[in-house]
Amino acid sequence: MTTPPSFRPASWLPGGHAQTIWPRFIPQAMPTLVRERLDTPDGDFVDIDWLPRQAAQPLVLLFHGLEGSSGSHYAKALMHALAARRWNGAVVHARGCSGEPNRLLRAYHSGDSAELDWLLPRVVPRNEGRPVYAVGVSLGGNVLCKWLGEQGQAASKWLTAAASVCAPVDLGAAGRALDEGFNRVYTQYFLRTMKPRALLKAQRFPGLLDEAAIAACNSIRAFDDAVTSQIHGFRDADDYWTRCASRPLLKAVRTPLLLLQALNDPMVPAWSLATPDLLSSDVRPEYTAQGGHVGYVSGAPKGRLNWLPQRVLHFFETGA
């Protein structure tokens, strides 16, 4: 069994905030992707962006983070790495994140494991018995971990292995962290797209959301109180955060899972990460000292983003 590649952070990019922000400034070409639209059982749709099909090769499904897409830096990096290996790959867009509003009031959220319940049986069989892997990033990582814990041994019917990257497994801790100090910069970045989308839903579905409350949102808690919890059946932000956190379910995971986190992630406090006693024997925790939130920049200026896909694919290939 080969040794996993160790992360060597860019020495010129110190600190969790710099490592989180800089990847957005590293030029990456958009890989060639083909879009497919799947109709959901409840009358909505999900868009999936696929690499060109490779016969008899493994498939890696990527579930992106909050307000992410196939244009996110980590999605481009992973898809390029898969294309270089001639593996199959796809970015599964959460509802409303593919550039077109979804049809229903319902959107997406950090605990939406039900989405995987209907999607995986429709996608996995297409790979004709070859291994299928999943990568969840940030919010998508929490969804994936939650689903794996809920499914237990049954998850292995659909996935050979999985990787979670910088997932807020304690949603309450991450939600509160985003509303403190410099992290409010990230909150405003997210809200600049989340609020207009929510206001559009309020107008399309009159009387179901409080437009004034949405317009006044200036924190993640306020948004989850006014929007996320209200359209997905939770009492408020605290109820949503508590019921959707994946950390209590990691003990029930029965599929090989790489749990990759950076201890200097500004959005996911190190103290909130899962300790060994909370993990099943199928979960491999890897908590790096550096990396920021889905940053993992290495090399000389302007930096490279190749370590993260290399680490994840090494785990899928070797189990280490």
Image (tube, grey):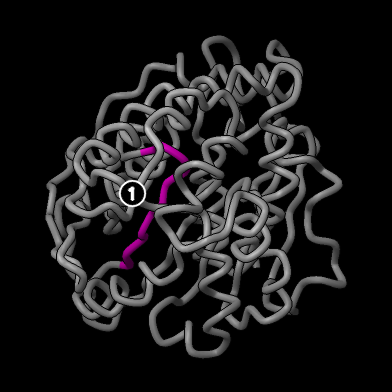
Q: Quarter holding the C terminus?
A: bottom right
Visible residue check, residue 50 = no
Q: Is residue 170 magenta?
A: no
Q: Residue flagged by tag 1: what amino acid is it?
A: Leu
Give above or below for 104 relative to 206.
Answer: below
| Within-10-Å neighbours for mark 1: few <14, some 14–19, many 20+ | some
Left or right position of 285 against 207: right
Give the residue pinned by disc 1.
Answer: 208
Q: Quarter holding the N terminus?
A: bottom right
Left or right position of 22 against 202: right
- Tell which residue pokes out farthest to the front in this image: 207
Give above or below for 146 relative to 298.
Answer: below
Left or right position of 221 against 104: right
Between 226 and 50, the one lying in front of the other is 226
Q: Identify the residue at image location x=42%, y=30%.
A: 73
Give above or below for 130 relative to 63.
Answer: below
Give residue 286's position: percent from left, percent from top. 73, 54
Q: Quadrant of residue 158?
A: bottom left
Q: Quadrant of residue 150?
A: bottom right
Give residue 34's position: percent from left, percent from top. 12, 47
Q: Is residue 65 magenta?
A: yes
Q: Quadrant of residue 280?
A: bottom right
Give residue 263's position: percent from left, percent from top. 79, 39
Give residue 225's position: percent from left, percent from top. 56, 44
Q: Identify the residue at image location x=39%, y=38%.
A: 68
Between 201 and 50, the one lying in front of the other is 201
Query: Over which residues does the magenta segment extend?
Result: 58-68
Q: Identify the residue at image location x=42%, y=28%.
A: 212
Tag 1 secondary structure: loop
